[in-house]
Image (cartoon, coloured by chain):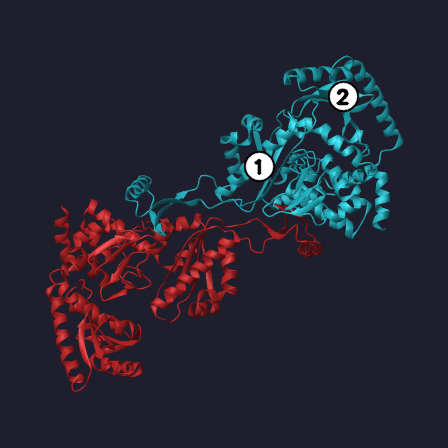
Chain colours: A red, B cyan
Amino acid sequence: MSIEEVIADALKLVTPDEEERERGKRAERTLRSRLDKVLEGTDISYEFVGSYARDTWLRGSLEIDVFLLFPLSYPTEELEKKGLEIGIEVVDEHELRYAAHPYVHGKVEGVEVDVVPCYRIGDASEIRTAVDRTPLHHRWLKDRIKGKENDVRLLKGFLKAGGIYGAEYRVKGFSGYLCELLIVFYGSFLETVRAGRNLRRDTVIDVKAGKSYRQRGNEKLLVIDPVDERRNVAANLSVDNLARFVQRCRAFLTSPSIDFFRCVDAEVSLQEIERELERRYVYCLKTARPDIVEDNLYTQLERGERKVFEHLQRLGFSPLRSASFADEENCYILVEVAVRELSPVTRRMGPVFEDEKNVERFLRKCRSRNQNPFIEDGRFWVYAERDVRLAGEAIKRFAGREWRAFGKNLGECVKNGFEVLEGKSVTECRNAFELAKFLGLISDTGV
Amino acid sequence: MSIEEVIADALKLVTPDEEERERGKRAERTLRSRLDKVLEGTDISYEFVGSYARDTWLRGSLEIDVFLLFPLSYPTEELEKKGLEIGIEVVDEHELRYAAHPYVHGKVEGVEVDVVPCYRIGDASEIRTAVDRTPLHHRWLKDRIKGKENDVRLLKGFLKAGGIYGAEYRVKGFSGYLCELLIVFYGSFLETVRAGRNLRRDTVIDVKAGKSYRQRGNEKLLVIDPVDERRNVAANLSVDNLARFVQRCRAFLTSPSIDFFRCVDAEVSLQEIERELERRYVYCLKTARPDIVEDNLYTQLERGERKVFEHLQRLGFSPLRSASFADEENCYILVEVAVRELSPVTRRMGPVFEDEKNVERFLRKCRSRNQNPFIEDGRFWVYAERDVRLAGEAIKRFAGREWRAFGKNLGECVKNGFEVLEGKSVTECRNAFELAKFLGLISDTGV
C-alpha cells in the first residue's frame, strides 16, 4: 500500500463519526444556553476553545473546553470562587480539578466538559495565570488550522498509538496544541512526518516566523509559542520521546502501515517475564499511592526513582536501569542491577600521608578497631566490613531511613510502609506491559 | 628509653664487627694485588667505590665494589670485552650480571665483589653509560661523609627493617647513595628522621646548594644529584614508600624502640589467611618465572597486574586492590574484587537518535539477534547477554587471549600456561607475608 492509501485508511480511525459529532453539537447547544442564562447581565463572557472548538479532536476523545473570561478587574480569589460557582451550575455530575487554579470538570448531555475561569486579555504580556494563554492559542489557530483538521487528527492518532501523545508528566509527550502548531508549520500530516525524521535535540521551530533552524547548545527541541515567544511549546516533551517520534516517522516512511495508528497492546507472555525476573536482578519498591494530582505524583515518583538508582550506584551495585509507574492503589519503582551481592569487605579512604594530624587520628581509629591500614597512591586506606551486601537489602534500608528522598507525599507513603519485591514476585505490580518494556522483552523505541 | 639510648643500642645492630671488617680488609688486599698485576702496563686504572670504600656498609652486607676506569678513547665494545676479561681474572667463582652493560660478580677470599668497567670522566657532562656516574658519586661523598659513617648505617638499618631499603624495581625504596646524601644534607641520622616526618611529595632537596623547598606540581620527592643536576637520586623511590618512610619517622620519634632496626617477620596465622580467602573474592594468577633480570621482571609483572586490574574494572567486577610478586619458580598476580558474579545481562550502547544511518544499522543488528532496543538520554541501547559472569573466568579469558599484555617475557610464560587460583587455594603461592599484607591482616604503612 502506498503511503497515501495508508493515510486515507487511517483517516477512518482518527475522524469522529456522525454520531460522535452529533453528541458534541447537542452538548454544545445545551451548554451554550445554560451559560447564556447564567452569565446574562454580568461582565463575564465565555469562549469555546481547544480541540472541540477547532474540530480537531481525535475520534473517541470528545471533550468540550469552555473558558470563562473575567475582566482583569476581578481579584484572583473572586475569579476562582465565581468561576467554580458558574461551572458547577452549568454542568451535571461535577468534580473539581486543579491546573494553575481549580476548575470544574463535569458532563453535559453525557459529554465530558471542562469549565475553566481565566482573565480576558489582549496579548501574552497581560497573562496572569497559566490558563490565560489558552484563549490566545485558540484565536491564533482558529483560522490557520482550517482545512487541516484531519491532518491534526492523523498526527494525534499516530502519536497516541506510539504512546507519546499528551504533555502530562506521566507521558512527557506531545500536547494537542503542539500537534496543531506542527501541522500549521509543515502544512500537512505527511509533511510533518517527513520533517519529523530529521528533527534533532538542537532544532528550533519558530512557528510565527515560519522558519526552523539548529542552535548550538540547545539541548531539547524548542518550539516557540506564536502567542508568547518566551515559551517553549515542547517544554514537556522529553528528549527520549522526541527520539521515539523521530524513529516512528522514519519507520512509517520506510514501511507505511495502518498499524502506526492502532493502539495495539504488545503481546507479552507472562511466562517470559517470570523467566527473566528469575535469572536477572530486578527489584520493585512498592508503596501506597498518595492522593495527589498525577503530575505532582509523577514528579515525586521520578525523583524517588533517581534517588534509589543513585544510592545503589554509590554502594557499588551497578544499577542498569530504573523505571516507575503507578496504578490506582500503589506506586512502583523498578530497578535492575548488575550486582546482586558484594564482597563482605570494602576499602575506606583515609588522609594523604602529608597530613600528619589526620593520619594520626585515622591510625588511632584503625588501632581501636583492630584494623590494619595500608598506603596507596600516597594515601592511607583500610579494609572495613561492608554494611550492606545485598542490593535488595540496600533498597530496604534506603527507603526505611531516607523516605524523605521520595518527596513530600510519596515520602509519607514510604514512611508508612513499603515492600521490596524481588525475582518472580515483582509481577505483583500487575503491569505486564511496563515490565516487558523494562526487561527489554518488547521494543521501546516508539515503533 | 630515650631516643639517644635507642640509637646507641641500634648502633650495635648496624655496625660490622671486627671479624667482618677483617674479612673485608683481607679481600681488599688480595683484590688490589691481583688488580695491580693485571693492569700493570695498561692505561686502565681501578677505584674502590660504594659503601665498602666509604665504610658505610650495613653489618652483614659486606660487598666490595671495584670500578675499572677506561680512557674515553676505548670504544664501548672494547671496554665491555676487556672489562669482563679483567673481572673474570681477578675474582673467584665469577658470574656475569647486567646493569647498563655486563659486569662481573664474584668472590675474593669469600667476600662478594662486583667488578664494573666504566669510563674515566671528569664530570657528569662526559657521562657515556649510567655507571660512569658512580665514581663521581664516590669522589663527592668520600670526604663529606667522614665521621658520619654510622649515621648512614643507622639510616640503612632503619629503612631495611621497614622493607624500603633498595632502589631496585622490586623494592622501589631508598638507594644506598640516597641514604648517604640525606645524612650529608641533614647532618645525622636523628636529624634525618626529624626532617623525614615532614617530607612531602612536592619536596625538593638540593644537596649541593644545601637547601630544601616545596615546588608546586612536583609529584614525587626530588633529590638533585650533586654531581649531575639533571638527575633525581630518588627517582626510583615510590610515593608510597616515601609515605612509609615519613610514617616510620613519625612513629620512631613518638615511641623510639630498637624494633625499628630489627627485621622481624610479622606473625601471621595461616588459618586467618585461609579464613579471609574463603569469605572474600581473591584471585591469584600464577605462571612460570621468566629467566630475566629482576628489574625487568618486576616491570613486566607490574604492567600485567595493572592490565588485569583494568580489565576487571572495565567488565564491572569492581577490583579493590592488586599486588604481584615472584619466587624462584613462579610469578603471582593477586587481585581482590568487590563483585564475584555479575548479572547475566548487560546493556550495550547504540547511536544517538539523530544519527539515522547508524540507528538503522543498529536496529537491523538488534532484529537479527531478536533483541529489543530501548532509548535512554536520546540514545539507543539494547540488553545483551553478558559474555563472562564470574571474575575468575574473566581473568582466565584475559590471560588466555591477551597474554601479550603481560610484556615480552612474562607474556610468553603466560602463553605457555597459567593457573587462576581462587579461595583457599590462593595459599599455593606460599608467601604468607605478602598475602597477609594484601588482605590487610598486617599493617603495611612502614611501621
Q: Is residue A394 left or right of residue B73?
A: left
Q: CA distance from mark 1 to mark 2?
A: 43 Å
- Residue B437 seen in render: no
Question: Percent from the top left, x then y, of residue A116?
Answer: 24, 75
- Residue A137 seen in render: yes
Tell me what residue is drawn at x 49 percent, y 57 percent: A311
Q: Residues within 10 Å of mark 2 (few under 14, many from 20)?
A: some
The nearer-to-camera label among 1 and 2 is 2
- In this view, B199 is above or below B149: below
Tell me what residue is drawn at x 35 percent, y 56 percent: A434
Question: Percent from the top left, x then y, of residue B309?
Answer: 55, 40
Whichever of labels 1 and 2 marks the residue nearer the N terminus, that label is 2
- Three-letter code, disc 2: Tyr
Tell me what residue is drawn at x 77 percent, y 49 percent: B252
Question: Which of the chains bears the disc numbered 1?
Answer: B
Residue ID for mark 1: B305
